[in-house]
Image (tube, grey):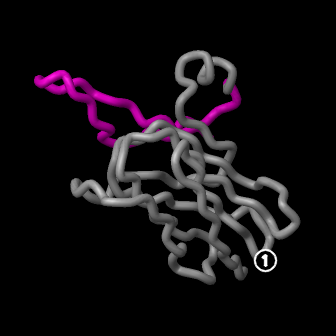
Amino acid sequence: FVISAGPISLNNNDSVVVGFAVVKGNDLNELRANNNTAKTRFNVIGIESISNIIPKKFALYQNYPNPFNPSTTIKFDLPQNDFVKIRVFDVIGREVDMFSSELNAGSYEYEFNAANLSSGIYFYKLESNFYSDVKKMILIK
């Protein structure tokens, strides 16, 4: 799966991300050639802005529900426009999922689906140019 958030131009020459599109298929090379800003390997349900208020500081919140089966929500705040990666790791440090995109300042929710993963402890990490944090989550099937 590939997620792509696309900007639209407004009358005052500003841009704003208004949603996301999920593209299914195996032709990842063509998708990468056309849009190299937002990708994930599998499991993503979506990411969306949840507020028009710009937060005062970076934050990564505990996922909910936790424990979860099979999907959970990861919320985070960006006080400024930034390139963001959300990576999910298993307990021995293997990356099992990744999302990356340039995002505008705001509060976001990332919906993570672990239907293809085994029960256990996982870690999710938010990385940007100015902030990094890790939290633990538990998948129970």
Residue 114 in magenta?
no
Which residue shows up at 58% across the image and 81% down it? 66
Which residue shows up at 47% across the image and 36% down it? 102
Where does residue 67 sit, x and y in percent of width and height? 62, 83
Which residue shows up at 48% across the image and 35% down it? 4
Judge by depth and name the residue closer to the eye, 102 or 129: 129
Q: Which residue is mark 1?
A: 120
**On screen, residue 90 above or below 46:** below
Crowdedness near tag 1: few (<14), some (14–19) or many (≥20) residues, C-alpha within 10 Å: few
Give the magenta range.
1-27
User: Is 32 left, or right, of 59 in this rendering?
Assistant: right
Which residue type does callout 1 highlight? Gly
Residue 4 in magenta?
yes
Residue 31 image-quadrant placement: top right
Judge by depth and name the residue closer to the eye, 77 or 2: 77
> Which quarter shows the N terminus?
top right
**On screen, residue 28 above or below 94:** above
Where does residue 113 sit, x and y in percent of width and height? 61, 62
- Residue at the outermost right position: 92
Judge by depth and name the residue closer to the eye, 17 or 42: 17
Tag 1's secondary structure? Answer: strand
Which residue shows up at 78% across the image and 53% down it? 95
Where does residue 68 sit, x and y in percent of width and height? 61, 79
Judge by depth and name the residue closer to the eye, 55 or 66: 55
Residue 24 image-quadrant placement: top right
Where does residue 118 sit, x and y in percent of width and height? 80, 70
> Which quarter shows the C terminus?
bottom right
Give the total of numbered labels: 1
